[in-house]
Image (spheres, rainbow, N blue to C red):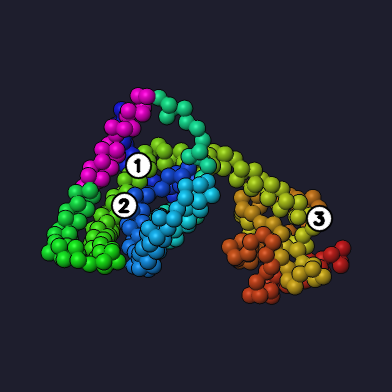
């Protein structure tokens, strides 16, 4: 059944589905990218603070050896030795830890596109307490894939380290006659070379893994045609409900339009099926405005209301058609029609004066 459902997921994930997944804390995330950034941070740490860390380490050793003969194992002396050792450890290791932490945070920010918070992963899931599901996760396809990737990385790192050390093998015997500082310097140089080669390999692997993780992420979010339809209904609303809302809105607009007909100055008609109600209020508008219009039954209803309230009806086929096509309800008459409308309004005002 799972395979059948997977085969039915033929549609690309929608933006809403991706957003919902990200809000739950699920992102296309590669651990190899994190490892590359951490390794780069470690390499920068060696290059920037390696020499100073070596001096601090040698200074700590010198102090411990120099004070070893005069050290008395009292509580106060033991506290001082412990405190000094911790301070030396922080001075040596602290910069590396800060850079590594910064590299790890930066890699996650880049992958997920900024700082994002989600409380969904913190919600307790009692299904995780099931031993059967626990064994299923341990022996899942993703776990096996991660195991093979880890073994592959260990193999490559071991191989690179071996060949790097082998290339410096002849330089090791002469170290017997050198000082501690020179030996540490040589070890640091070899370590930097190994880290740099591993970093190049990790960058290549992280790019491949990131592309694979993004592909897998989108594949897991693919949707069936039914899911697409249901999501569209949720997003856009049920078509039947939308139609009812649209019908109700149109009915309300029609009622408002009909309520404006009694206040119109004239209704221009096409004798067959068009009615245009026009009102001109010089104190409010610079030109006459269309307050109602319609065709068919609506046009007939406009004429009935106009007759009931004594609004004159004037037949003008070309003008009625032009107004219906070019002017919306509430809009002013365009300048090109001023003359034609003015003639009709003058005629209407003259009739009112005679009456």
Taking 118 as reference, is 63 left or right? left
Q: CA distance from mark 2 to mark 3?
A: 83 Å
On residue 220, which mark appears?
Answer: 1
State which region is magenta.
Answer: 131-152
Q: CA distance from mark 2 to mark 1?
A: 20 Å
Tell me which numbered mark, 2 or 3, is placed earlier along the sequence: 2
Q: Is residue 150 magenta?
A: yes
Mark 3, Cα crowd under 10 Å, few <14 / some 14-19 / many 20+, is: some
Task: Residue at 71%, 53% (x, y): give it.
Answer: 257
Q: Position of residue 90 (x, y in %)?
A: 45, 57
According to the picture, the residue beneath numbered tag 3 turns out to be 310
Q: Position of residue 118 (x, y in %)?
A: 51, 45
Q: Is residue 243 magenta?
A: no
- Between residue 72 and residue 51, name the one nearer to us: 72
- Between residue 344 and residue 106, name the one nearer to us: 106
Q: Nearer the viewer, mark 1 or mark 3?
A: 1
Q: Is residue 165 above or below residue 216?
A: below
According to the picture, the residue beneath numbered tag 2 turns out to be 32
Secondary structure of the residue carrying tag 2 is: helix
């Amino acid at each position: 059944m799972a395979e059948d459902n997977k085969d039915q997921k033929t549609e690309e994930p929608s933006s809403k589905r991706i957003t919902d997944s990200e809000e739950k804390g699920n992102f296309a995330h590669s651990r190899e990218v994190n490892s590359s950034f951490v390794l780069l941070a470690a390499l920068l740490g060696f290059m920037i603070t390696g020499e100073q860390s070596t001096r601090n380490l040698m200074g700590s050793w010198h102090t411990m050896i120099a004070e070893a003969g005069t050290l008395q194992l009292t509580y106060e002396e033991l506290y001082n030795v412990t405190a000094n050792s911790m301070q030396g450890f922080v001075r040596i290791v602290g910069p590396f830890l800060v850079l590594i932490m910064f590299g790890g945070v930066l890699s996650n920010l880049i992958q997920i596109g900024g700082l994002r918070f989600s409380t969904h992963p913190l919600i307790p899931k009692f299904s995780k307490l099931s031993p059967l599901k626990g064994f299923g996760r341990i022996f899942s396809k993703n776990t096996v894939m991660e195991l093979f990737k880890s073994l592959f990385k260990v193999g490559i790192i071991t191989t690179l380290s071996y060949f790097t050390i082998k290339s410096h093998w002849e330089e090791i015997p002469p170290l017997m006659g050198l000082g501690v500082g020179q030996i540490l310097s040589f070890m640091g140089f070899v370590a930097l070379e190994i880290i740099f080669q591993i970093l190049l390999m990790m960058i290549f692997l992280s790019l491949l893994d990131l592309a694979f993780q993004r592909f897998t992420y989108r594949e897991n979010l693919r949707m069936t045609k039914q899911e697409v339809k249901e999501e569209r209904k949720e997003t856009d609303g049920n078509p039947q409900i939308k139609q009812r809302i649209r019908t109700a809105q149109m009915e309300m607009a029609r009622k408002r339009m009909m309520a404006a007909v009694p206040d119109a100055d004239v209704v221009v008609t096409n004798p067959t099926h068009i009615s245009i109600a026009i009102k001109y209020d010089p104190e409010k508008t610079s030109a006459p405005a269309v307050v109602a219009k319609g065709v068919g039954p609506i046009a007939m209803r406009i004429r009935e209301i106009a007759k009931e309230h004594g609004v004159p009806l004037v037949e003008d086929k070309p003008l009625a058609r032009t107004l219906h096509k070019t002017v919306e309800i509430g809009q002013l008459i365009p300048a090109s029609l001023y003359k034609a409308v003015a003639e009709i309004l003058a005629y209407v005002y003259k009739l009112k004066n005679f009456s």
